[in-house]
Image: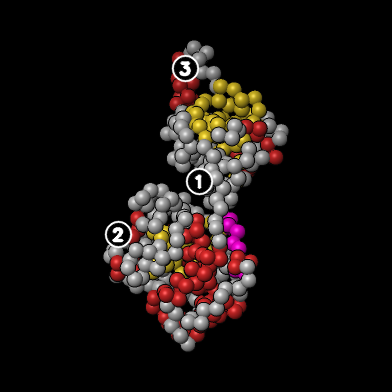
Amino acid sequence: MKMSKVLLTAVAAVGFAGLFGGTLSANASSKVNSYIESHNYKPAKVTKSIWSGFPKYKYRHGVGKPEGVVIHETANPSSTIYNEIAYMKRNYNNAFVHSFVDASHIINIANTNYLSWGVGYPGNARFIQFEQIEVHSKSAFAHEIANAAWYTAYLLKEYNLKPNDAAYDGKGTVWSHGSVAKHLGGSTHTDPVGYYASAGKKYFGQKYTMAAFYKMVKKYYTAMGTTTHTKLTTATYKTVNQQAKLSSTYAKYYLYNHVKGSNKNAAKQKWSKITPKVGKTYYVDMTAKKSTGSTWYRIRPSKNSSKRYWVYSKVLTDVQDVNTSTATATTASADSSADSASATSSSDSSSVATSSSDTSAASTSTSSVSASN
């Protein structure tokens, strides 16, 4: 993305040698690709640092349904990855992308299930987008290309997309910003073509091209093999007005932002978020009955708290309905009504599990989840 203004806890990344069961097959047509192979580079870890300030708009086919990946370059030779990210957060109304890549980092700061705006209409509604920072050595450029190609393959696998170079007919899944501008419009930018050419010539005596980059993506994608995703279970949700006490066995389990195994974005949360204390009363505004038979509760640390977290049923004890029917005084009745309204104010309703009904406090990290419990 030729914009000096646009800038953007870890998911485990697999080492290139282990990922490919050895080394990449040689690519004699590209000195950069051959250099990466000969040095057996490992990818950086994908650091998830999702910022809650970004807007969330669905892709044209729906949430979690991108159609490809766009590769950008910041066109700012003096910036760092963290400067770019900070700048983008301040100026996201102008443009933003999902992630940033350099020689040592792959940092994902916007949820890839939702669109970003870095290429204009209509590309924004179709593609995941990430930026590359300009680096300044032979080794750094090779590392950055390896990270960017691996991350592109990773995203394609994540969303069940097959590699297809969009440069020729504008119908693929791997795009430069230049290809988007050429085939779809919405921009006049050509990145990262110029950066690739100049850095390749400077450090390797040969211009690097998007065609060579695409070959790297295909090698990594093929070497990743078949991706097996944990099958999500369904859950039936019910709005309630209850309270319960924290069990003495709570530490054996975890706090979650979604029902574990019923939402692909379910991730463990720190117990400190609810100030845990055995016997302390927490408020329950929703239950979830998973198809596996287990029951989950969505709790709030205090009656009027906006923070909500999911816990397995064994985390709680003495679960009771909040009784508001016995209040007779006018003030008491009003208070009870207010409490009831607060407890049921969530837009969630009883239904089969969906990402919209399974809401909670925003999570800044993700991890793999199983369907157990």
Q: Position of residue 238 (x, y in %)?
A: 50, 29
- Residue at 62 percent across and 35 percent down: it is 312
Q: Is residue 100 left or right of residue 67?
A: right
Q: Position of residue 121 (x, y in %)?
A: 30, 59
First in residue order: circle 1 vs circle 3: 3
Kindly identify which residue carries mark 3. 333
Kindly identify which residue carries mark 1. 362
**Amino acid type of the residue that numbered disc 2 sits on in the rendered structure:** Tyr
Mark 3 element type: helix
First in residue order: circle 2 vs circle 3: 2
**Foreground mark, 1 or 3?**
1
Q: Nearer the viewer, residue 119 or 75?
A: 119
First in residue order: circle 1 vs circle 2: 2
Kindly identify which residue carries mark 2. 121
Q: Which residues are magenta?
A: 9-17
Q: Position of residue 271 (x, y in %)?
A: 63, 42
**Amino acid type of the residue that numbered disc 1 sits on in the rendered structure:** Ala
- Residue at 55 percent across and 25 percent down: it is 242
